[in-house]
Image (tube, rainbow, N blue to C red):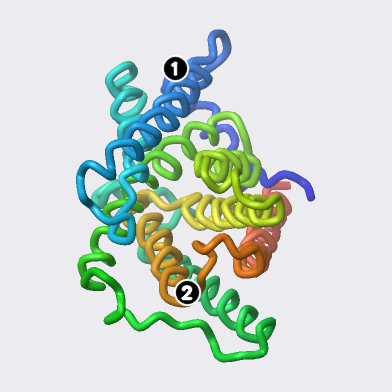
Amino acid sequence: MPELKQRGAGAGRDAVSAAAAAGEGPGPRPWKAEAGVFLAVAFAAAGAWGAVQPATGIPPEVVQLTQFGPAVAVAAVAALWPGRIRRRLAGALPGAGAAPAGERRGPARGPLLLLTAVLITTLSAGAYAMAEAGPVHLTDPRSLRNPFLLIAVAQLVGACGEEIGWRCLLQPLLRTRFGPLTASSLVGVVWGLWHVPVLAQAPAYAAAFLAGTVAMSVVLGLALEHVRGNRLLLAGGFHTLVNLGMLLCMDEESGAVLPMVLFGGACVAVAVPWVAAAVRITAGAAHEAR
């Protein structure tokens, strides 16, 4: 599949100008240093959070402290390159200013992005029920060891702890050098590998999980491509809905391969329309630019 490029020749020139303004033009490549520091700290901090969680008494069902590894990494990178990181995080929160022509604000794509997260759970759970020739696997929220409202809020906070790194820093950073599809796929690969314990599972389980993270990263990257505000809340909301859906409707946490394979397949399936739409829009913009 041809790489998705900036929408139109003018957008490509704007990207080059923005990169130069951010100190990312020809010569040394500080983006590599930023990415390297971010990834090193994200992996190390996640390991440290995971090691201390048992001592905190916080149940992993409520929130896994490893999720805050990327947030620590963002703080570390910001301490080294405050100006650049401030620009990268400009669209993470509301109030990013007026969007240029052709760009959309968060609310325009937000409902569709969140609906995609619900669709992933629906497809996964439905396929699992069909494969098992039984009812849909559902966990009554009242049967959880902790109040569901507490879990939902904590999951959103934890998801935002991840997404401020993956979608609000690393994705924009890689977009200074790659098209949206490549950048999103690279973030998805790193995001999947960052879940180190998954790699200890059966090969099919780990491969399906990695396919899922890449596919979800592509959906998020394309959905947020021209969103200039609320990126963190949108990405965190998507992430939370997927996590809660898996908690209530699947049992992949047991290490069972089938539910994870079905989950990965559902993620790939929902990513296809997003990629097709992005290709169509890009092709139309290129045609108009001729």
Relative depth, front residue between 250 and 232: 250
Relative depth, front residue between 284 and 156: 156
Inspect the image, locate mark 2, and give the three-letter code of the amino acid beneath it.
Val
Relative depth, front residue between 153 and 142: 142
Q: Which residue is mark 1?
A: 23
- Position of 14 compared to 228: left or right? right
- Residue 40 place in picture, x, y as percent: 45, 24
Q: Classify mark 1: helix, strand or loop.
A: loop
Residue depicted at 54% across the width and 65% down the height: 252
Q: Classify mark 2: helix, strand or loop.
A: helix
- Residue 104 place in picture, x, y as percent: 43, 57
Query: Dot 1, crowdedness within 10 Å: few (<14), some or many (≥20)?
Result: some
Residue depicted at 21% across the width and 50% down the height: 57
Inspect the image, locate mark 1, and give the three-letter code of the amino acid beneath it.
Gly
- Residue 153 place in picture, x, y as percent: 24, 63
Q: Is residue 112 above or below residue 129?
A: above
Quarter of image, res 142:
bottom left
- Position of 7 compared to 75: left or right? right
Q: Which residue is mark 2?
A: 118
Quarter of image, res 108:
bottom left
Quarter of image, res 34:
top left
Relative depth, front residue between 275 and 14: 275
Residue situated furthest top in the rendering: 27
Residue depicted at 65% across the width and 56% down the height: 205
